[in-house]
Amino acid sequence: MKRKISGALFVSIVAGSTIALSPYPASAQIGGIVHDPRNYAQNILTAARTLEQINNQIRMLQNQTVSLLNEAKNLAALPTSTLAELESQVDRTRGLLGEAERIAFDVKDIEAAFEGRYKSSALAAPNAALVAKAEARWMDSVAAFEDAMKVQAAIVGNLGGTRASISALVTASQSASGALQAAQAGNQLLALQSQQLGDLAAALAAQGRAQALEAARSAAIEAEARERFRRFRGKN
């Protein structure tokens, strides 16, 4: 009898120890509801993993949004454009060069004018014709200097528009929100620089034309003086 009691007590102690050492307590029924701690813990773990996945997706969407915004800024066009003003300034300068009086910037016109008024072949004309040609050469020089001054005046007039364009483009470049806007501002500044170089070339061309015609007139005067002297000696 004592052995049976001792065996039952041992079984009870082992069973109790097993329950105490188990990681999850056994299911319990409370108020008619069965509570399984192992299932509850698994559900909590699953919910935590799901929440982490959702947070990862939210962060990924945020990164994609930032990337799209950056791309939109880089692709945004520059709202400032000085192209129309630059083209207008270039057209004004070209128009003045095209209005050159007497001897224009044309190879055929230059050849015809020099053949008739500046070269030695023109010295064979009668005295009255020599006087007319000398007057024509003087008018060529005066017109050339007048044209040069007109071009220079137009270039000086362009400086106001150039200053305004530079100010607008520098401001736009400093406030550019993306790569495209910065590049477009830089391109317009380069176009403005090209326009200024074009004005400088036009001024040099007009001034060079005037100086060349004056030098040609001086040479023609010298040649004509020799011809007149030769004719004078021939009569005496």
Image (cartoon, grey):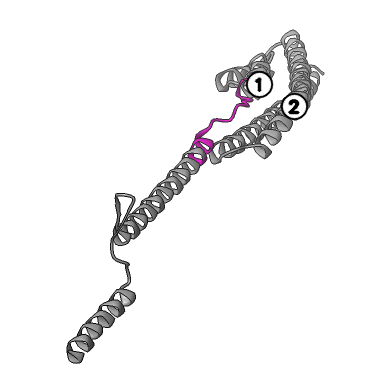
Query: Can residue 230 be seen by looking at this rendering?
Result: no
User: Residue 134 in the image: x percent, y percent?
Assistant: 76, 16
In the image shown, does 68 or 41 lie closer to the viewer? 41
Quick one: label 1, few (<14), some, or many (20+) residues within 10 Å?
some
Q: Answer left or right for 67 relative to 205.
A: left
Amino acid bearing label 2:
Ala
Q: Secondary structure at mark 2?
A: helix
Q: Which residue is mark 2?
A: 164
In the image shown, does 133 or 23 lie closer to the viewer? 23
Q: In which quadrant of the rendered image does the C terminus lie?
A: top right
Q: Answer left or right for 16 relative to 157.
A: left
Q: Secondary structure at mark 1?
A: helix
Q: In which quadrant of the rendered image does the N terminus lie?
A: bottom left
Q: Answer left or right for 154 relative to 75.
A: right
Q: CA distance from mark 1 to mark 2?
A: 10 Å
Quadrant in the rendering for residue 90? top right
Residue at image x 32%, y 68%? 24
User: Residue 6 in the image: x percent, y percent?
Assistant: 23, 88
Amino acid bearing label 1:
Glu
- Magenta region: which residues? 70-85
Is residue 79 shown in magenta? yes
User: Residue 70 in the image: x percent, y percent?
Assistant: 51, 41
Residue at image x 68%, y 32%? 196
In the image shown, does 171 or 89 lie closer to the viewer? 171
User: Residue 179 in the image: x percent, y percent?
Assistant: 55, 41
Q: Answer left or right for 72 relative to 43.
A: right
Q: Which residue is mark 1?
A: 85
Query: Can residue 210 be seen by looking at this rendering?
Result: yes
